[in-house]
Amino acid sequence: MAKIMKINVLSAALFGAGMTAVVMTAPAFAEEGVKLVIDGEELTTEVAPQEGNPLDPVRSGWTFRSEETQALETDDFENPGFPLVDYGEELWNTADGSTGKSCASCHGDASESMKGVRASMPKWNKEKNTLFTLEDYINLSREEHQGAKPWKWESQEMLGMTAYIGLQSRGMPVNVSIDGPAKEWFEKGKKMYYTRYGQLDLACAQCHEDNQGTMIRADHLSQGQINGFPTYRFKWSGLGSIHRRFKGCMDNIRAEPFKRGSDEFTALELYVAWRGQGLSVETPAVRN
Amino acid sequence: MYEASRAHVPDKPDCTEEESRHMTKGFIYSIAAASLVLAGSAVAAPVAPDDVKFVDMTVAESLTGQPGDPKAGRETFANRKKGNCLACHANSEMSEQLFHGEVGPTLDGVADRWTPEQLRAIVVNSKQVLGEQTIMPGFYTMHVGDRVAEKFVGKTILTAQEVEDVVAYLTTLKEQ
């Protein structure tokens, strides 16, 4: 059975000082340096940045959450994202579309064929000559291989399938390629990350780079990493996609969000994934 | 570091101190004239966002020609759809509200550190006082980011009177 291991790195005194500086009740933070261990396997939640990444260290959103929230991710029986993972597995083995094929008909055992797929997304699709998200690959396969209708981006089917496929990479380091034609998309995503949007006139970087670790009202500002998607959020009472999370941020700053699946959000996804290079895939992660 | 907003914010006030003194004087006269004309009916129209004059990082005059109401300002300060100031600032005077942010400095004693005219300038458009890179939104400015959501296009976060109310409230936050 999975369990949480606590290793204190920072002194309690340091932590205590931080807490008392705030005059009002703050949510209970987890202790620093705690390791994420799932089914006996330790995941990487903190890593040194690769060249050009301004984050040092690179930290999973898991390290910013309360002890209670953290604990839920350490046990697949308690992780509220798992019922949908099970649904994804069921879909994997169910025939669909005019060809009467299931995913398994061609791809066999997902634990072998899908291993590492999530870790490298989004990825350049040579045949289609564009950048593909995991959702794009799934719908391509449905339409062209199964003869089935594409799933809607935020449907239970798509979330179940992306969660099930993502799980096959859990524990593997995020490793996206920004070489070749993907470079242009990377640069576009980077430009977006530093562009101020909305009536509140805010860029992603102002909260998730400059002010990471501080409290914005009752929320602890993270680095905005996406290594755990689709993620179960209490706020959503369910799993949600990376693009849904991007949309939420844009709504908060009173900006007109880009559409899920748009070139803009796909470019941003590549850039943000790159900022988390080396973190373990945590799909399905649990956050508040 | 950040991409400039669609609307450019000048680095310097777009008039000299001398000019602005004249303008301020003229402004006072026009307010006075307007008050005479409107005496007994409505008050003068508030200064439009693009017409607010920043001089030495201050906005000297009330945007409405009226003093602010600190009690109303306290409510606007706390309202999540208005000032939402607690999202980023702690404020001991408002300890009945849980979870104060820490992105910006605490507002305890803010009136000891800034004059009312400086506080008005910061609330109207903090970039004029704190610099272009500040994370603090401008609450009475049209210099905003790209892709403003349709329902907020052409609107400021606070009205001129709400700015005055918040400034009046901030002015009460003294420690000395």
Image (cartoon, coloured by chain):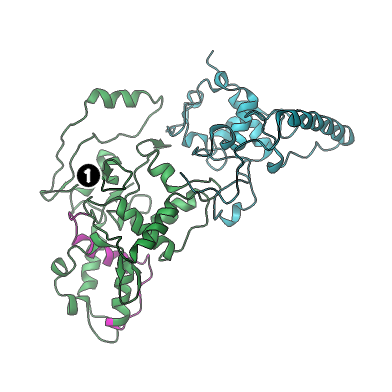
Residue A226 seen: no
Callout 1 environment at 10 Å: few (<14), some (14 to 19), or many (20+)?
A: some
Q: Nearer the viewer, residue A195 or B64?
A: A195
Asked if the magenta segment contains residue A169, the reply would be yes
Quadrant of residue A83 within the rendered picture: bottom left
Q: In the rendering, what colour is chain B?
A: cyan
x, y percent for residue A22: 39, 26
Q: Residue furthest bottom?
A: A98
Q: Nearer the viewer, residue A257 or A90?
A: A257
Q: Which chain is green?
A: A
Q: Is residue A5 left or right of residue B149?
A: left
Vertical arrangement, residue B69 with respect to residue A47, above or below: above
The disc numbered 1 marks a residue on which chain? A
Which residues fall within the magenta stretch? A145-173
- Amino acid carrying label 1: it is Val
x, y percent for residue A288: 34, 46
Vertical arrangement, residue B175 with respect to residue A210, above or below: above
Say what secondary structure mark 1 lies in: strand
Residue that numbered label 1 is attached to: A47
Residue B87 seen: yes
Q: Residue furthest right?
A: B37
Q: Is residue B57 left or right of residue A245?
A: right
x, y percent for residue A96: 27, 80
Asked if the magenta segment contains residue B117, the reply would be no
* Residue under the image location 74 percent in, 38 percent down: B46
* Residue under the image location 26 percent in, 56 percent down: A81
